[in-house]
Image (spheres, rainbow, N blue to C red):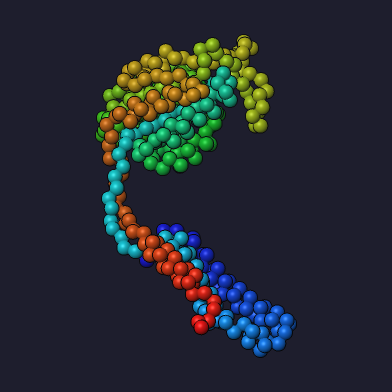
Amino acid sequence: MHWGAFVYLNFLLLIPAMIIFFILAGINKRKKVEKFGDIALIEKLSFSKSLTKERVRKVLIVIALSFLILALARPQIGARLTMTKRYGVDIMIAIDTSSSMLAQDIKPNRIEKAKMEISSLIDKLKGDRVGILTFAGDSFMQCPLTLDYSAAKMFLSIIEPGMMPRPGTAIGDAIKTAIKGFTKKERKHKVLVLITDGEDHNTNPAEAASEAKKEGVMIYTIGIGTKKGEPIPIVDQYGKINEYKKDKSGEVVMTKLDEEMLQKIALITDGKYYHATASEFELDKIYNEISKMEKKELSSRLFTQYEDRFQYFLGIAFMLLCIEFMIGDRKKK
């Protein structure tokens, strides 16, 4: 026998506790009767009450409770083998972790907004594999393609600016690293979601996008930030802003969203560009686009499916309680 909710079996410990309670209650009742008066006289006065029926009722209550607890534990008898298959696409998410992502033209800042977007996108996925890649001056596969969404979100939670050893924003290199994360022999079922402010430092993203196109990778780009620009804050270990980044001449460096670059990357691979918004409507559009893509079989497994039989235990408990109710506690005339 298999149990669907094994933890409820712990409540069976209540059964001996109830038996002890009934015994102690009977002893206590008899002591009170003895204090009240002569026990033999009192028994004669209450001759119509049946002690046997009273004991039978208590036994029925204990047994009924036992069956109720067993029903809660969901006993499962019999099993059958079932084959399940999961279909989806491979989705690699590349997130910019350069210092410019600390800019606060989007609240609370660009990097936190990007992480919220990724988390929301993962929540929408059903059966697709997802991977996470971080990049700044270089790029790193933070989480390889997986069906374990909770693991992907765990890796996402530890991402922060400055985690990459080399400063800068190498979008082209990030695209090439993402390509390596997909299955080489396939030419479809591949999606790269690129989240960045688009400020590339001479890594030729267009050329990398063309390479991705040849490998069957469709790139969706999400722009974080504003065209107006925002100074890059320098924060201490407590997250407090001490000053703003300056160039060699002492001027405050302004970071601006390069939408043209991101639009070009998406266009080359037949993808689309979206600007990050507070309502995150762009995620719905990207997910709808992905949902329309041809799916591939990502996993299949054979598992044992057990049949619930708690109904029988519940029925027995109900029947015993009905019998207990009908017995009464008086002797037959």
Q: Nearer the viewer, residue 98 or 327?
A: 327
Residue 93, relative to residue 53: is it above or below? Answer: above
The image quadrant of residue 41 is bottom right
Q: Nearer the viewer, residue 310 or 176?
A: 310
Count of marks, rendered view: 0
Residue 18, relative to residue 81: is it above or below? Answer: below
Would you say residue 87 is visible in this rendering?
A: yes
Identify the residue shown where x is 40% and y is 62%. 310
Identify the residue shown where x is 63% and y is 18%. 244
The image quadrant of residue 21 is bottom right
Identify the residue shown where x is 29% and y is 32%. 189
Residue 167: x and y, percent?
52, 24
Outermost residue to the bottom: 40
Residue 294, relative to residue 248: is it above or below? Answer: below
Residue 34: x and y, percent?
70, 84
Q: Nearer the viewer, residue 255 or 114?
A: 114
The quadrant the N terminus occupies is bottom left
Residue 262: x and y, percent?
41, 17
Would you say residue 102 is visible in this rendering?
A: no
Q: Nearer the viewer, residue 244 or 173?
A: 244
Identify the residue shown where x is 27% and y is 31%. 294
Residue 15: x and y, percent?
53, 71
